[in-house]
Image (cartoon, rainbow, N blue to C red):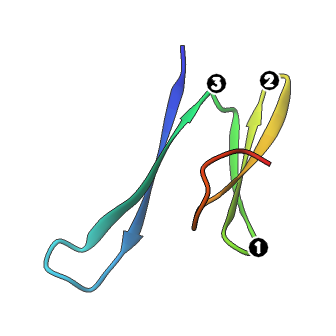
Amino acid sequence: NASHVMIYEITRTKTRHKRIHELMLPCHAQTLQILSEGRLCVGYPSGFSIYSILGDHHPI
C-alpha cells in the first residue's frame, strides 16, 4: 500500500502548472512539510523521510 506525492511547479503559461516530480512513498504519509533548500519532509506512523524536491528522489 504505497502512496504517491506529485510535485508541481505553478507557472504563468497557458496550462498554469508543470509536473516536476512524482515520489513513491513506502507507506501512507501522515504529514507533509516543505523545508528550506527545496526539501520535503514526509512523516509516517513509524518515522519520517526527507526528500529533495529539486533533484535526487532518494530520501535523506
Q: Residue at x 24, y 74 (%)?
A: 16
Q: On screen, 41 above or below 54? A: above
Front: mark 3 or 2: 3
Q: Residue furthest right?
A: 47
SS label for mark 1: loop
Tag 1 residue: 36
| Residue 31 in the image, given as x and y percentages of width and height | 70, 41
Q: Amino acid at mark 3?
A: Pro
What amino acid is labelled 1 in the image?
Ser
Q: Position of residue 45 (x, y in %)?
A: 80, 23
- What distance separates the C-alpha of mark 3 from that of mark 1? 23 Å
For residue 20, which numbered disc appears in the image?
none
How far apart marks 1 and 2 lie (CA) works out to 23 Å
Q: Position of residue 47 (x, y in %)?
A: 86, 31
- Answer above or below: position of 5 versus 54: above
Q: Is residue 37 left or right of residue 6?
A: right
Q: Which mark is residue 45?
A: 2
Q: Upstream in the sequence, badge 3 or badge 2? A: 3
Q: Nearer the viewer, residue 52 or 31?
A: 52
- Earlier along the polypeptide chain: callout 3 or callout 1? 3
Task: Tell me if mark 1 has few (under 14), some (14-19) or many (20+) residues whose alpha carbon lies within 10 angstroms of its own.
Answer: few
Which residue does the numbered mark 3 point to in the structure image? 26
Residue type at mark 2? Pro
- Residue 18 percent across, percent down from the top left: 30, 67
User: Which comes before the other along the chain, label 1 or label 2?
Assistant: 1
> For this rendering, which residue is in front, 21 or 5?
21
Q: Is residue 20 above or below residue 48?
A: below
| Residue at 37% from the left image edge and 74% from the top image edge | 10
- Residue at image position (81%, 38%) is 48
